[in-house]
Image (spheres, rainbow, N blue to C red):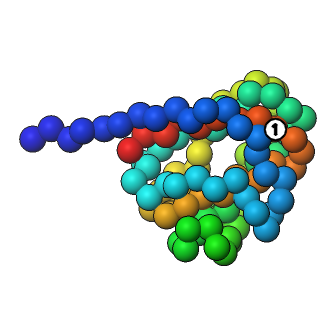
């Protein structure tokens, strides 16, 4: 039996800086991915989750109760999406400052 896998790269777009309206990403079938920071002055990327198509958002946490965020050391850069988000219907991305990004997602 062969399992078909798919890899998708999204077009570049601006990332939200609002915790009440994160950049919404459908994530239901994704098992791993990266966020490609293309440009901007971002220093921190924070992840949120939603199970209702982005109507409500909750901060993402790992198994130890640590908030899911990534420090951005340089622009451009590639950051792994935390594996603790696998199984979330939607993930939300929030930058602390302006950023343009794209995603590489594997499902």
Total marks shown come to: 1
The quarter of the image holding the N terminus is top left
State the residue at coordinates (56%, 35%). 10
Q: Is residue 68 visible?
A: no
Question: Which residue shows up at 39% across the image and 53% down it?
Answer: 29
Residue 50, given in percent of the width and then of the height, sits at: 59, 69
Instruction: Determine which residue is flagged by label 1.
Output: 99
At x 74%, y 27%, the residue is: 38
On screen, residue 11 above or below 27: above
Quadrant of residue 63 within the rendered picture: bottom right
Tell which residue pokes out farthest to the left in this image. Answer: 1
In the depicted structure, whether residue 51 falls above or below residue 8: below
Give the answer, above or below, for where 107 lies relative to 69: above
Residue 13 in sight from this viewpoint: yes
Q: Check the picture and name the quadrant holding the C terminus.
A: top left
In x, y percent, where is residue 87?
45, 62
66 or 5, nearer to the observer? 5
Q: Nearer the viewer, residue 62 or 35?
A: 35
The residue sitting at 47% across, 44% down in the picture is 32
Find residue 83 and report its horizontal and vertical position in percent: 52, 51
């Amino acid at each position: 039996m062969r399992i078909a896998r798919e890899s998708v790269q999204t077009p570049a777009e601006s990332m939200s800086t609002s915790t009440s309206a994160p950049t919404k990403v459908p994530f239901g079938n994704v098992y791993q991915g990266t966020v490609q920071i293309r440009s901007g002055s971002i220093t921190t990327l924070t992840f949120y989750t939603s199970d209702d198509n982005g109507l409500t958002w909750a901060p993402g946490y790992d198994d130890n109760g640590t908030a899911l965020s990534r420090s951005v050391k340089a622009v451009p850069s590639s950051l792994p999406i935390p594996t603790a988000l696998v199984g979330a219907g939607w993930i939300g991305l929030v930058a602390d400052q302006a950023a343009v990004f794209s995603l590489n997602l594997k499902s």
